Amino acid sequence: MTTPALARLLTGLPDRLPGLRAVYEDLHAHPELSFQEFRTAGVVAGRLRGQGWDVTEGVGGTGVVGVLANGEGPVVLLRADMDGLPVRERTGLPYASRATAVDGEGDEVPVMHACGHDMHVTCLLGATAQLAAARGAWRGTVVAVFQPAEEVGGAPAMIEDGFPDRFPRADVCLGQHVAPAPVGFVGTRPGPVMAASDSLRVRLFGRGGHGSTPESTVDPVVMAAAVVMRLQTIVSRETGAAQTAVVTVGSLHTGTKENIIPDTAELRINVRSTTPVVRDRVLAAVERIVRAESAASGAPKDPEITALNSFPVTVNDERATDAVLTALTGAFGRERVFTLPQTLTGSEDFGVFGTALGVPSVFWHFGGADPALFRDADPERLLQDGLPATVPANHSPYFAPVPDPTIGIGVTALLAAAAPWLCPEDPRPATGEEA
């Protein structure tokens, strides 16, 4: 049951939704790569200023921070990420992206909001508009963070740009992510909620030559193929059945022509893990295999292994998560709010804010997929069995949350989660001193 305070925060939201949908479609049609979110940041900053927020641009590169002080009370940080991905959109939507950009390697690539960050920005802009319009319903300060470059770890860039000292220090950090789950369902869990992520670039060195005389070469294509196949044994043969790890080779580039054996091959590898012990073991195994296959192939030079980015495990504070789950259940109903049974293997850098500030944080997921795709599925079984193969997941060229009612649900979830701190008549979460 929605609390009276949340009901006041939501006043006027139905009238605001058509405008928010227009914002969403515009952002979806104009995605930008990590640390290139100049247009998106401009849209965000302009709308925040129009709502009456104190706005700072260029935080951590292209980040935008809005601050709205509304009397004495807790400080709540609400965060959305802004960047798109180098993916060619295939949704066929009338507002599908046709954008391209030059990536960090100097290559022109297609760009798509294939992870839903356009939805996150839209929902947070909706929440900030509601908060600005309903100042009589809450007390405290809200720090709205529109973060760049989540896909490559943009949160640390904002922290390194002096975020903890430049803005009011939050008492709690709250964030959300749209998921390929049925629209209307929300889930999270206390403790570890998303996995750690480590990305590596590996360069293998061979000796090139003519395809007709492979005996005079050291073929890095064969070397790379051996590495890719052997890496799969890390999870299947070196990780316990009750442990969680994922090793993915998402990119392999080598060669220019079918009858030329090249000199080098480059692989980009991503590792997911949920505990420090497993993380260390898997990363060590990756390096061992890469070096061993290189040596076994008679490579003329040792491989180069370069760390690209690293995200820590996202950990939800237990007491704050209980408060958020209670609030979300009140907003959406017990049958639509789930406690996730295990840590998700996706990764996030949202937790960097709470760690840097030394405060609790809570991160949750809300469904954005067309319910028709789940017509014969039991939502509770999805938690155990996973998504049907026909449902496009995040990072797919077909990933496309349905705008209605996903936008309204995302706005409501942010406001509901913040209400225990901002609304005096709502039950406040216990602090460490009160425990």
Image: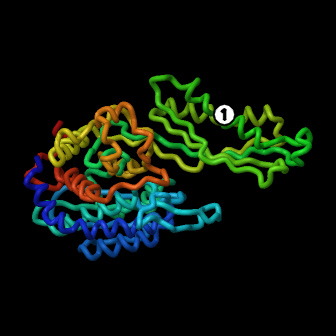
Answer with the quarter of the image where residue 17 lies: bottom left
Residue located at (24% from left, 43% from top): 320
The answer to whether residue 363 is above or below residue 108 is above
Q: Position of residue 141 (x, y in %)?
A: 22, 61
Residue placed under numbered mark 1 in the picture: 229
Q: Residue at x 82, y 39 (%)?
A: 299
Residue depicted at x 36% and y 31%: 384
Q: Nearer the viewer, residue 121 or 368?
A: 368
Q: Is residue 150 left or right of residue 418?
A: right
Q: Identify the residue at image location x=78%, y=45%.
A: 205
Q: Report the side of 323 relative to 80 (left or right).
A: left
* Residue 189 image position (x, y, % from top left): 30, 37
Q: How many marks?
A: 1
Residue 165 visible in the displayed image: no
Q: Amino acid at mark 1?
A: Met
- Residue 161 visible in the picture: yes
